[in-house]
Amino acid sequence: MKKILTKDNSITFFNHEFKENLHPESGAIESVYKRYINHLKLRDNIKVLDIGFGIGYISLIILSKVKANITALEKNKDYIEAMKNLKLPYSLKEAYEKLKNINLITGDATKTIKKLNKKFDLIILDAFSPISNKELYSIDFLKELKNRMNKDSVLITYTSNPIVRFNLIESGFKLQKYRISKYEEGTIASLSKENLTEEDKRLIRAFSLPV
Ligand SMILES: C[S@@+](CC[C@H](N)C(=O)[O-])C[C@H]1O[C@@H](n2cnc3c(N)ncnc32)[C@H](O)[C@@H]1O
């Protein structure tokens, strides 16, 4: 695993199987805030499913803010080992101890998801890009996620890829887009809220072939 120091001084890793970094080099921890945390309503006792746990930054930041009940899915055990040697900012050091209490399940999430018999308030889908990590954006998998949500739950993912949005809609979700940066837009999927324009929907239909 190649270790990379990113511009906000936090560490990420290059994944040789997917040929992608776990986080952008512009700032690993900063990207977690921009892509996810800044757009979420977190509260104590929230039930969270963190898919693509990696080196745990998302769960860690959530635990630094609220008392969350977290289940995490990750297939690569090397990252869980690598987490032990991360240099963390002071603000996250206390939360690091709380990571020991989460339910971390290793293995392919498309299989391990089937072992989970509970509903989550928040699902974070932080996979690699939709081109290389297709199984985590497939209709079959997204339907498994939907079955583990209730009417007020949300699923958040950093991508605006039209195929992913198409698959989410096909799986029965309503979608909201949100701005991450000038160049990045994310997607929030739920059973009730929608803010896509007719033009967005037309583009999703035009670009989409199921993955
Ligand atoms: C973009 S990285 C996530 C980074 C992570 N959220 C963090 O903050 O450190 C994507 C992660 O998804 C994991 N992954 C990819 N395919 C998977 C699968 N089928 N099942 C479980 N985990 C998978 C990869 O091993 C990688 O750790």
Image (tube, rainbow, N blue to C red):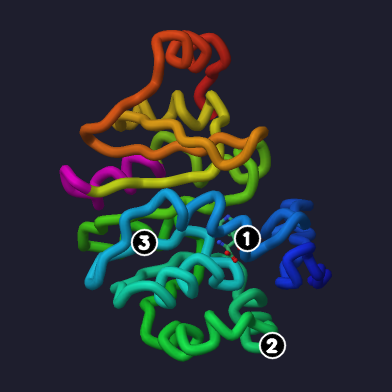
Residue 49's disc is 3
Magenta span: 141-152
Residue 25 point in image, percent of width and height: 77, 57
Indicate whether 40 appears above or below 188: below
Whether residues under marks 3 and 1 lie with C-beta atoms below 8 angstroms apart, the answer is no
- Measured as percent of width and height from the top left, residue 43 is found at 26, 65
Write down the quadrant of residue 158 in the picture. top right
Q: Which amino acid does label 1 sit on?
A: Glu
The label nearer to you, 2 versus 1, is: 1
Q: Does the magenta stretch include residue 206?
A: no
Q: Is mark 2 on a helix, strand or loop?
A: helix
Marks 3, 1: nearer the viewer: 1
Secondary structure at badge 1 equals: helix
Residue 172 in sight in this render: no
The residue singled out by tag 2 in the image is 85
In the displayed structure image, the side of residue 100 where residue 163 appears, left or right: right
As measured in the structure, the alpha-carbon distance from the residue carrying label 3 to the one carrying label 1 is: 21 Å
Secondary-structure class at tag 3:
strand
Residue 29 drawn at (x, y percent): 62, 65
Image disc number at residue 185: none
Q: For the point 66% across and 36% down, which residue is it?
A: 131
> Which quadrant of the frame does ligand 1 lie within?
bottom right
The CA distance from mark 2 to mark 1 is: 19 Å
